Image: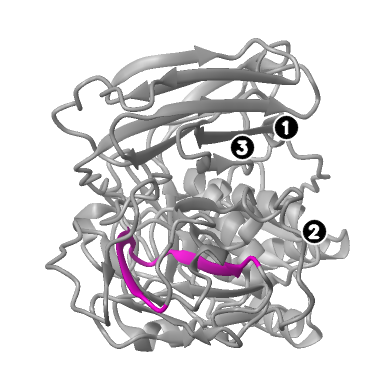
Amino acid sequence: GVVGVTSKANMPLHIGKGLGDDGFGSNSGVLAAMESCVQSGAKVINMSLGGPDASGAVEEFLTKLENDGTDVLIVAAAGNNGDSSFSFPASYNSPLVMSVAAVESNGDRAGFSQYNNQVDIAAPGVDIKSTVTMNAGRDFGYTSWDGTSMASPHVAGVAALIWSHYPSKSVADVRTALECSAVMPEQYGDDVKNNEVGYGVVNAKNALALLEFSDFSGCPTIAPTMAPTPLDCSEDIIEIIITTDIYPSETAWVLTNSCSNTEVASEDNHPFGEYEYTTKICVPPGGEYFFRITDSFGDGICCSNGQGSYNILYNGESVASGGEFLNEDIKIFGQCGTPPPSPAPQVTATPSVAPTSSHSPSYPPTTTGAPSQVATFSCPSGQVEFSLTLTTDNYPEETKWILKEAFKWQTGTKIAGEPFGAYNSSQTTYIETICIKKNKSHIFRINDKANDGLCCDHGNGEYSIALNGQEPFHSGGNFGKKEQVKFMAFPDYSDMQAFTIEIEREPKGVYLDWTSKDEEENS
């Protein structure tokens, strides 16, 4: 058989036959198949079929499902006429129906794929291998077909896959996650949605993360694109490449700078098996690094259950690799104060790359006697400037902060931060400027070691955060152990407000013993 999108998910299937053996049928036959699926408890219905005529009976059925609050998503092929005409059931104007266009391997809309304002999303639909019957159904074989009927099952499969992880979510949540996480091909520019490919090409990893977040309203006004964002790194580059086995959720890793005893990056969220994940990180020159990869089951990532592996590149040169281990594997590379291999001439970022920063965690922060202007700073295309203005209280060494690209703190990727002890001047203003990915969810967290914040028991400390040199979108200081701000990195603040800014604050209290393990330093 052909491996499907949900091949590793344990979910029942129900087959509803709406067409005859000759591939033709009627609206009544299609409606009967839809009703059969719903009555059997189907959550996602794929409909790789269509015709030019709408049916009043089908429209009434969809309206009843909506009014009854039935959680079912109907994913249908947009049609293969190559024009702007409507095909049904894909083009019914119902929140329960998604119309799927077909794209070629380069992201272009396939020439046969119908294009109109009902197209919601796109998926691969050219040269798709499938199993077929032969000799009047007596034999089976393989063939490669083109069509929106080949694209639609990709979206239905992703919908079923992410819904299986969060079964309590509503059909509206699932649909919004699919649409808002779709990747717009580069050739369509900054379109959020168009008639060619809808919101873009379905992306399972993005959709799974966004469904977990699931507290947004609408989609961003600037869509993410497939174009790789250059990693404009003036320092050194570490690239961590993880290929998962068939049990990806068992894998986690952390990279630590042994010289400064600070975490550089970590990842424990690998939702897809036999999949390559790449993380690129800018680091200061001349460091020793401690890499630890773990497998919670105790059989490594190779070779009992797949051919998983890892490889670490330092400025383009491999410094550590492996995959065959039990519970953990540890590699140490580099040396404190010793320059690493010369940087490669050009590096591009993958979707999991960490942004560059104007201030590296292992350098002492630049201080000013009073608030001052940040030097001219320019971010590459696809990124926005994040600035933190921090004024310490009388005990600066008690303050630390971390910025993650994340929908959820525990599963996010750390991209910048300063540990306890990094700041050593009281009542002093520090300015940090970092390039972060545009249109992505981020979480900023600031901690106080003595559980009394920055203000106002021991001085008048404060902090503020802003994007692209604009006025701060949040400021604070009067908290206890920590304050956390979750935001979407939209260049336009009005778009950010539409997705809401979430603030969590722990009030002041008793002094905590931070000599024990700091559970937040590495989480």
Residue 250, disc: 1
Q: Is residue 84 in view from this perspective? A: no
Start-end of magenta stretch: 427-449
Work out whether 88 lies above or below 66. Answer: above
Which residue appears at 45% of the width and 86% of the height? 475
Report if the CB atoms under discs 2 and 1 are less than 8 Å apart.
no
Q: Is residue 64 in view from this perspective? A: yes
Residue topped by disc 3? 272
Residue 432 is one of the magenta-drawn residues:
yes
C-alpha distance separating marks 2 and 1: 30 Å
Work out whether 499 lies above or below 162. Answer: below
Query: Is 293 positioned to the left or the right of 40 in the image?
Result: left
Give the mark nearer the N terminus: 2 vs 1.
2
Work out whether 504 lies above or below 339. Answer: below
Query: Is 55 positioned to the left or the right of 387 in the image?
Result: right
Tell me which amino acid carries mark 1. Answer: Glu
Q: Circle 1 — which element? A: helix
Residue 114's quadrant in the figure? Answer: bottom left
Q: Nearer the viewer, residue 454 or 378?
A: 454
The 10 Å Cα crowd at callout 1, few under 14, some 14 to 19, many 20 or more, is many
**On-image quarter of the N terminus:** top right
Which residue appears at 63% of the width and 83% of the height? 479
Where residue 7 sits in the image (x, y, percent)? 69, 34
Give the mark nearer the N terminus: 3 vs 1.
1
Where residue 352 sits in the image (x, y, percent)? 43, 45
Q: Is the magenta stretch mostly helix, strand or loop?
A: strand
Give the mark nearer the N terminus: 3 vs 2.
2
C-alpha distance separating marks 3 and 1: 11 Å
Where residue 464 sits in the image (x, y, percent)? 41, 81
Tell me which amino acid carries mark 3. Answer: Phe
Residue topped by disc 2? 42
